[in-house]
Image (cartoon, rainbow, N blue to C red):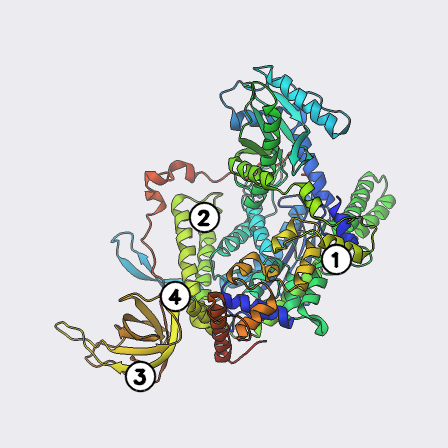
Amino acid sequence: MDKASLASALGSPAVFGQSQFAFMRGNAFEARVKADGGAELLRLVHDKLDRSAEPPAGAQVPALSATGPEGRAARTSLALREATEAPGTWTLLDHPMLALDVAGSPAFLEPDAVVVHPDGSWTVVEIKSFPMLDGSADPAKVGAAARQAAVYVLALEQVAARLSPSPRVRHRILLVCPKDFSNLPTASAVDVRKQRAVTDRQLARLTRIEDIADALPEGVCFSPDLPADELTAAVEAVPATYAPECLSACELAFHCRARSREAGAVTSLGRPVRAELGGLSTVEDVLAAARGEAGDPADPAVAALRRAAALRAEALATAGGGAL
Amino acid sequence: MSLITTLARLEAVRTGRAQSAATVRHRHLSDRPLVFVPLTTAGEAGAPLGALAGTDRDAPHLLVVPQPRDRDLRFAFLAELADVVLPHIEAYADAVEAAERTETDPETGKRVKVEVDLCADAAQLIVPSRAGVDFVRLLGRSMRFRRTAEQDPEAPHPAPPRVPLLGRWLTHYGERARVPGSSLLLAMTDLLGRHWATGQSTLEDQHLGALLAWIDPPGGASGAEAALRAELARDADGQLLCPPAGPATDPAFDNKLLAPAIERYDRARTALAAAEDGQAADERLGALTAAEREIRALVESRTRPTWDAVWRGLDLLRELPAGAHVEDRWTRDRWSFTGHRDRILSGEPPQPRRDDAVTAANKLATREREQARLEAQEALDDPLVMAGRRLAGEAFAGEVTDVVMTYSEGKRPSPRPLVTVRTEDRPHLGDRVKVYRSLGGRPQAAEFAGQEAEGVLVLRIVDKMGRGKEPEAGSVPEKGDLVCFTLFEHEQRGGARLPDPEQTPWTHGGPPGEAAAVPEAADAQTEEDIL
């Protein structure tokens, strides 16, 4: 489903987009890293992850083109098997295609590269265009890259499980970034065991798509061509819990935020706010409880609220200002 | 976030206006701050696109890099930035007053007072958002290791003369901004977010336009509507009406307006280079100038709204009276400023890429100490902050209901009056826990001596009563006085002294030795002229 056009049809368009400068720069850097049959990339893999193996020279770079994502995924599996069965050589898979089962439907993933080591083990390579300054990069971006790579590791493990003997999928991935302010590549090994475990657990716990579909009333349709009010009603049928963190991840976040604010949900001010207010979940409930008009005084959350309201009023009165 | 701030946010949602989160201003604001609104090129590290900078709100300097991927144009930008920023900083560095500082005498090892210069004031730098602070640090890092033609005649791409110096100053400002409560380099979103609670999440408060819309909605609109407009409203061309405060630009702006303009500029430049005779060159130079002017107009159109917003924010903040301890923290900033000035004057090399163990430990200790100091001082300056501490059980206020004079046992009995305080607060007090109150700006300590009844506390005052047998007048609270005691200390003690870098223990890498004596190499440069 195209959530971006759905969001536009609902009247709260998403604001995601990529600048063509960033796009060009990312592509140029990746091309540079993979130039000469991936010589530089393999050198980095050897240097950071597998010093004991022989240095890569004349690595295999199998062609992976095929029609359709299924075809490419099958081609990738084949190339992985062949590479694993040829010990002692390095193999670079440029933009392989992997399939991963997400909530009952296959999702196709395209890592930047996968390297097969001489010992037959596999490594995910992630090429990013944010800089590694003096050996350290923006932790938020590295975290996002690690989570992304963890999904690739999971997908590779599914491929590996179908081979016998199963090759090892390395849990240390290689993150390749530009060094300082140049476009020379540098790399760092990132351990993604934790991210892998988290993703694995989340995937296992995801509600299956059929179950979500079963819960919907008959005849619900999410076509962006529908009138806005019908579409809104259809989207309402799927329960969603908005929190401000959604804004950076989901195309529908602005729609959900508008609904959440309309309903006066305190979570729209942030998850921690919701956590400290106990059972009170709407703005009006909280303010009424704070004013002493509603709520059970024996409830610790209500008592704390009244105390806070009294202290705030006292402080503002002392300062002589009052609310602006 | 304390429950009191949460309440303020909910109140803001209800009323549609931001609510006070502070009753005084907790940061120093210079009379002549240097406002800096930078823009960067998406996807590139350290490739600025342009900036507005200056101290006059009506006449900012507009600096533009028409082709951000061109090294020479970037250097020209940085040189121009140095011409705006460095004279401002140097004007402050030159005006000094005499001050005293305790130093360890290298020969005797004793602590002695020495007369030193302290800058009478320091230059303040204000950027729109936290990302702007990071960008200042990044700019500093990208410049401070550059080599000028004078330093290294062999270097292939020498930097303009004052660029490395600007890099060192910006690095210092970026580093100082990590110290809690410091005001050398401030982000406007942080400043406003500290003093007002809006009806949106702290995440959304990072948007300067939306934050200002809550505090000061234009034309009587509600804060929520105005904030939504600031966040999302676009014109017929799909451009945001309120451009992001940067340094990142909106992708729609990059793709629709900036990229075509840069392409036209590149074409005009290629054409000029290929011109064969003087007349053709003149015409093509005209085309190049026009293309450059177009990019300048684009950059100005994206930075000017932010520039105005920063000054609007300064106006709002200036309406608040300064907190009592703000000056004290600014003096620490002045020491930091003076220290850096002295390091540059004495010819020290630029700040290293990685701090040595002792410097790093010192920085960390400073930040922790300043954090504690900031929390204590903000509470003492501002009843609203104190209310939060009282709610958390870290302070209590009430009325003195009884004072009984007692004396300590010993050779020379000293006064140890017992003060009974009735309070509504619920402080976390254990037996003999120390509590403090502010007495003429100095902390007076007392011990918790027991609880008579629910909310009736007995405290034993232990100091600041003079040397005599009778306490000095006004040093002991009287019946009926309103008092406020805190469980946290008002002044921070420094931690244990760390060894000099030359004495670094082997557990932390040992003394720096010969390696540190070699000046750090400049960054490797890409062969091509274009990144």
Mark-to-mark CA distance, 4 and 2: 23 Å
Name which residue lies at 56% across and 18% down. Answer: A165
Res B39 label = none
- Left or right: residue A260 versus residue B284 is left
Give the letter of the chain under mark 3.
B
Q: Is residue A170 above or below residue A25?
A: above
Give the letter of the chain under mark 1.
B
Mark-to-mark CA distance, 3 and 1: 62 Å
Q: Residues within 10 Å of mark 4 (few under 14, many from 20)?
A: few
Res B99 label = 4
The amino acid sitting under disc 3 is Glu
Residue A318 visible in the displayed image: yes
The amino acid sitting under disc 2 is Glu
- Residues A145 and A296: in front is A296
Res B348 label = 2
Seen as rendered, the residue at the extreme left is B411
Residue A184 visible in the displayed image: no
- Element assignment for label 4: strand
- Element assignment for label 3: loop
Reading the image, the residue beneath label 3 is B478
Mark-to-mark CA distance, 4 and 3: 39 Å
The amino acid sitting under disc 4 is Ala
- Element assignment for label 2: loop
Label 3 vs 1, first from the N-terminus? 1
Res B240 label = 1
Label 4 vs 1, first from the N-terminus? 4
Mark-to-mark CA distance, 4 and 1: 51 Å
